[in-house]
Image (tube, grey):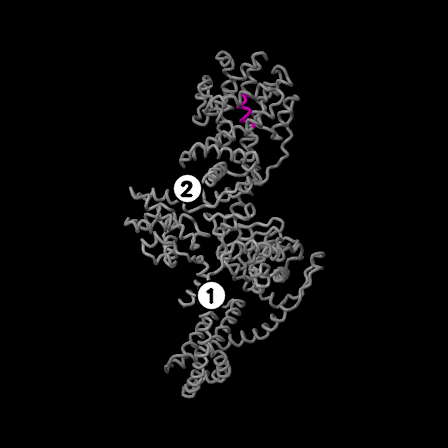
């Protein structure tokens, strides 16, 4: 049982959120009427445009600010954003691609052991918080990385952070703490399960 | 308590120089007092003892000193403080109880609670479900055996904890399950419904907990055994085992599908043979169809052979569906269904009617299929290529020019509809959003009309800080106006200010009408808007401070008498404000103004909270009319006091 087991742990990035600006005013109605895969929400004042490849949903505001969500990697997000800008260009707007920034990355990870949340919270008092009445997971916030990790009792983690590197570092940091409060699968029980099936 | 409340406003006028600081403390004291009152109220409803309430008040004081009440409802903060106390003391109160009392969403309270706990660095110990058992047991009405049932339930909960059922779950759910089982063990008939009403979880949750408990080995023990023995073995959390279960099922499924594929391969061979046989025996098509039939055959066989495996047909179907979306032709979808239907039909026995129908159906498919397949074959490789191109980064951010590498223009063309499609979409969109467009049109019309009338008020969301330049004839007036605009404090006593600068009311009588009309105009223009609350407030509070009364009196009385009057006058308009909230008749105001004494308590409670629009509007009207009244009866006022 290693305690520095990053290779064995799969950190799967499920969502990357990025923003960029087109530096020009966009007419939402034109986009809504001439684009495919668009949803226009006039009450809120934005257009949702969905790209198929890479699978991205973009919220477009008339000021030219665009938020892209749903990408599975940072590069994907960038390609998607550029595709989107190209599409807008074709619709006739003088689009310039500027200020592209990845704002949030969401990743999931699964530990091979279950975790005792109460112990985990006790050991890491102010940084970790656990309210079973409100949410089944314990929240661990790493301030200097600006990352939040939600730890579930089954050993699954969801990590959110400003970029992929931070997310990976966060998982590395929290692993030893989780390892201490683990509850490994019992052999007898595993045998029982096998025999049941 | 009464003395405290009275001291507040009475103190202010007497301090000449440092009234800013006293005003600040007064506000803080009032906040703390109202907080204390609310804590007492809520705490009594929860049946907390005095010690807890005092601790809660201490927490509240800390919160206020750290300015954490800003931007939060007082109710939420109070509730969070109380809950904090409950947690630290270990009382069996749930956040749900508090939210029930306040009718606020639990998660909002929870958010506030977590924030306060973090800011005050208070480590609330984790909730133990064992704490709730006695409370729920009492509510379930077990009579004399309550204690026994509670003990059994406690043991059950402890067992659950060992079996890892409690992490990540609401403690109340566990308690509910434990109590239900304990009740049954002691031959009490408590249904699930009874338990839920007490414990506040839903039926599904309770059932789930019971089934989970059933799966633990402890459930196999008899009652006596359970009371005596405690099994050594611990279980894994149910969600963990469920997850493992899932992965196992998935593996099984994969194996099965693989086997299925093999079997299907065999079936498809038989299918092909059957088809070829049937085609040979199919009646020849004559006339126009003959020509098509020749075309069909290569296409058809191509399609059929390639689509013989169900999986491939499905993938083609997917591709074709994608193409249909691109071209927005609905009938293709129908065609697709038919084709799939046909493929599936080939498994079964074909009837004579079948081949003809299929031949006809295949006809319709031919033309679109050809075009679709044609297009797809050209674009598909294109797209695949483009995705592997690298994406350069640097230049874009600097110049803002869009780099076109890795972007397939053709694909993007597909994202844009052509003219006819635009027309269709425009129509659809117009119809769909007819209401919204109607609203917009009405709004525009309204604005246009108002513009013509000259009463167009721009509905801007931000308040304009730069007000009009108001003329002030004296330095005192100028200072007042400045303070109005700068909104330093609403509790400044303008009387004292004026005293400092101008003795005697020579200039003052000229001003009340001015400022009155000023205020009136402002009122009429901005009645609906809260943003001019400042003017309201100040005008209202000026009235509270006895602006007009004092001015009038200053004209008629000498300055020496002012100090005495001020005291009584302060209470006067205060009572006026309270009565305006209850009755809106001017007579009532005039009457009550004669009796300041009996209403000190209610009055002083009112000023800090008198900020509502209607009250202010009413006050304004009242002040004006009262002013007029008083203007008439100026001499009488003097006599009364």
Tell which of B441 and B495 is nearer to you.
B495
What kind of element bears circle 1? helix
Q: Which mark is residue B629?
A: none
The image position of residue A68, as x and y in percent, is 59, 57
Q: Chain of mark 2?
A: B
User: Disc 2 marks which residue?
Assistant: B92
Q: Earlier in the sequence, mark 2 or mark 1?
A: 2
Q: Which secondary structure type mostly characterizes the magenta part of the structure?
A: helix
Q: Chain of mark 1?
A: B
Residue B500 lies left or right of residue B145; in this view the side is: right
What kind of element bears circle 2? loop
**Do circles 2 and 1 both sit on a common chain?**
yes
Residue B173 lies left or right of residue B572; in this view the side is: left
Q: Answer yes or no: do the residues labelled 2 and 1 have beta carbons within 8 Å?
A: no
Task: Please say whether residue B387 is one of the residues in the magenta stretch.
Answer: no
Report if residue A56 is visible in the image: no
Crowd band around label 1 with a 10 angstrom C-alpha radius: few (<14), some (14–19), many (20+): few
User: Disc 1 marks which residue?
Assistant: B247
Residue B301 lies left or right of residue B419; in this view the side is: left
Report if residue A159 is visible in the image: yes
The image position of residue B31, as x and y in percent, is 52, 31
Numbered-mark total: 2
Residue at image point 64% right, 24% down: B479
Farthest front residue? B228
**Which residues are drawn in magenta?**
B538-547
The image position of residue B489, as x and y in percent, is 59, 28
Q: Does B77 sit above or below residue B289?
A: above
């Amino acid at each position: 049982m290693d305690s520095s087991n990053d290779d064995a742990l799969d950190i799967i990035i499920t969502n990357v959120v990025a923003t960029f600006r087109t530096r020009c005013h966009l007419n939402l109605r034109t986009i809504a009427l001439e684009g495919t895969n668009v949803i226009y929400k006039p009450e809120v004042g934005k257009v949702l445009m969905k790209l198929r490849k890479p699978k991205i949903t973009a919220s477009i505001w008339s000021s030219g600010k665009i938020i892209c969500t749903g990408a599975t990697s940072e590069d994907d997000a960038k390609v998607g954003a550029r595709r989107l800008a190209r599409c807008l260009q074709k619709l006739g707007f003088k689009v310039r691609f500027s200020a592209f920034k990845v704002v949030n990355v969401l990743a999931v990870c699964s530990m091979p052991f279950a975790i005792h949340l109460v112990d985990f919270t006790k050991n890491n008092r102010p940084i970790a918080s656990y309210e079973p009445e409100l949410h089944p997971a314990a929240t661990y916030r790493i301030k200097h990385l600006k990352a939040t990790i939600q730890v579930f009792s089954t050993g699954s983690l969801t990590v959110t952070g400003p970029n992929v590197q931070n997310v990976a570092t966060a998982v590395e940091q929290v692993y030893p703490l989780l390892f201490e409060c683990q509850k490994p699968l019992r052999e007898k029980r595993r045998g029982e399960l096998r025999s049941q099936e | 308590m009464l003395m405290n409340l009275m001291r507040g406003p009475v103190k202010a006028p007497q301090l000449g120089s440092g009234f800013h600081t006293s005003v600040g403390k007064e506000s803080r004291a009032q906040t703390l007092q109202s907080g204390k009152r609310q804590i007492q109220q809520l705490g009594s409803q929860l049946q907390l003892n005095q010690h807890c309430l005092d601790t809660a008040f201490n927490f509240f004081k800390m919160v206020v000193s750290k300015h954490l009440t800003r931007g939060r409802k007082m109710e939420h903060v109070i509730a969070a403080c109380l809950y904090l106390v409950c947690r630290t003391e270990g009382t069996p109160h749930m956040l749900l109880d508090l939210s029930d009392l306040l009718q606020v969403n639990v998660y909002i309270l929870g958010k506030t609670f977590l924030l306060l706990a973090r800011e005050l660095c208070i480590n609330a110990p984790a909730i133990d479900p064992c704490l709730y058992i006695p409370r729920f047991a009492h509510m379930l009405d077990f009579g004399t055996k309550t204690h026994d049932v509670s003990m059994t339930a406690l043991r059950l909960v402890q067992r659950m904890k060992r079996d890892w059922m409690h992490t990540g779950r609401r403690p109340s759910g566990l308690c509910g399950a434990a109590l239900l089982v304990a009740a049954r063990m002691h031959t009490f008939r408590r249904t699930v419904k009874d338990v839920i009403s007490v414990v506040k979880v839903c039926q599904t949750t309770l059932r789930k907990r019971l089934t989970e408990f059933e799966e633990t080995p402890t459930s196999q023990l008899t009652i006596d055994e359970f009371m005596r023995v405690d099994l050594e073995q611990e279980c894994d959390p149910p969600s963990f085992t469920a997850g493992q279960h899932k992965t196992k099922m998935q593996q099984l499924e994969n194996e099965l599908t693989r086997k299925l594929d093999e079997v299907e391969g065999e079936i498809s061979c038989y299918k092909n043979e059957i088809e070829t046989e049937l085609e040979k025996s199919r009646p020849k098509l004559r006339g126009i169809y003959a020509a098509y039939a020749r075309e069909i055959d290569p296409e058809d066989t191509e399609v059929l052979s390639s689509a013989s495996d169900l999986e491939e047909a499905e993938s083609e179907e997917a591709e074709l569906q994608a193409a249909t979306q691109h071209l927005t032709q609905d009938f293709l979808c129908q065609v697709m269904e038919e084709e799939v239907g046909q493929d599936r039909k080939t498994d079964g026995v074909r009837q004579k009617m079948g081949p003809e129908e299929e031949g006809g159906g295949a006809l319709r498919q031919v033309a679109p299929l050809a075009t679709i397949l044609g297009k797809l074959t050209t674009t598909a490789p294109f797209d695949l290529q483009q995705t592997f191109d690298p994406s350069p980064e640097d230049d874009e951010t600097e110049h803002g020019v869009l780099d076109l590498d890795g972007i397939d223009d053709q694909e993007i063309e597909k994202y844009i509809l052509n003219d006819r499609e635009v027309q269709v979409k425009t129509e659809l969109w117009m119809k769909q959003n007819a209401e919204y467009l109607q609203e917009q049109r009405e709004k525009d019309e309204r604005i246009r009309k108002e513009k013509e009338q000259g009463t167009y008020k721009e509905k801007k969301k931000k308040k304009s800080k730069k007000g009009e330049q108001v003329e002030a004839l004296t330095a005192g007036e100028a200072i007042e106006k400045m303070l109005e605009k700068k909104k330093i404090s609403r509790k400044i006593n303008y009387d004292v200010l004026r005293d400092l600068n101008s003795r005697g009311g020579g200039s003052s009588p000229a001003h009340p009408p001015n400022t009155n009309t000023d205020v009136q105009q402002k009122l009429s223009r901005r009645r609906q808007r809260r943003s001019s609350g400042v003017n309201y407030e100040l005008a209202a509070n000026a009235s509270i401070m006895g602006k007009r009364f004092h001015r009038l009196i200053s004209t008629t009385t000498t300055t020496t008498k002012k100090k005495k009057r001020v005291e009584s006058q302060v209470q006067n308009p205060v009572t006026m404000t309270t009565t305006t909230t209850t009755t809106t008749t001017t007579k009532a105001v005039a009457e009550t103004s004669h009796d300041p004494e009996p209403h000190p308590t209610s009055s002083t409670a009112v000023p800090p909270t008198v900020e509502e629009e209607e009250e202010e509007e009413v006050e304004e009207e009242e002040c004006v009319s009262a002013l007029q009244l008083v203007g008439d009866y100026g001499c009488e006022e003097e006599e009364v006091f």
